[in-house]
Amino acid sequence: MLITTNTQNRRKIFADPTYAKEAVDSLYRTQQLYPFLLFGFVVMPDHCHFLLKVPEPLKISTMMRTYKYGVTFNLGIGAFWQSRFHIRVPDHGWKALEYIHLNPVRAGLCEMIEQYPWSSGSGKWDITGLDT
């Protein structure tokens, strides 16, 4: 599933590298609490995209609520997320992953996928799922 969640009024909260890192770290902490398969992600200045598979009986809404609450709590800057998130089931996972990874390039934040540090496309984050 491709999940997109936005900041309220598209505030560029994650333009701050400290906040962007916390958004990524919170994703992995959420994965420890609620094991799901993570195929890719990007944290943009005003939104996040996640490509993942949530196994039954876990509900995406539970996982996302935990994620968004964790980021908000750890940043300590008050509420900043839109209350909802968008879910799409892509026909081709690799196209969705390419879309996620190219997001910062299209936005002019970098020239190559590998240059954007807050994306699984950078190669610096583990996206193989949980070690079991």
Image: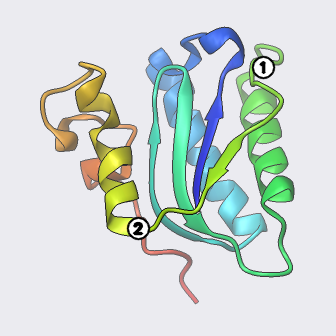
Compared with 87, 52 (above or below) is below
Q: CA distance from mark 2 to mark 1?
A: 34 Å
Classify 10 Å Cα crowding around label 1: few (below 14), some (14-19), many (20 and above): few
Q: Nearer the viewer, residue 77 or 54?
A: 54
Q: Residue at x 32, y 66 (%)?
A: 94
Compared with 57, 94 (above or below) is above
Q: Residue at x 27, y 21 (%)?
A: 109
Compared with 47, 26 (above or below) is below
Classify 10 Å Cα crowding around label 2: few (below 14), some (14-19), many (20 and above): some
**Which kind of residue does numbered mark 2 sit on?**
Gly
- Farthest-out residue, left: 111
Side of 47 relative to 127 (left or right) = right
**Residue bearing the label numbered 2:** 93
**Residue bearing the label numbered 1:** 76
- Farthest-out residue, bottom: 132
Q: Residue at x 44, y 23 (%)?
A: 17
Compared with 1, 98 (above or below) is above
Numbered label attached to residue 90: none
Asked whether the viewer can see residue 16, the reply is no
Counting from the top left corner in percent of width and height, residue 23 is at 59, 37
Side of 74 relative to 94 (left or right) = right
Q: Nearer the viewer, residue 117 or 80?
A: 80
- The residue mark sitting in front, 2 or 1, is 2
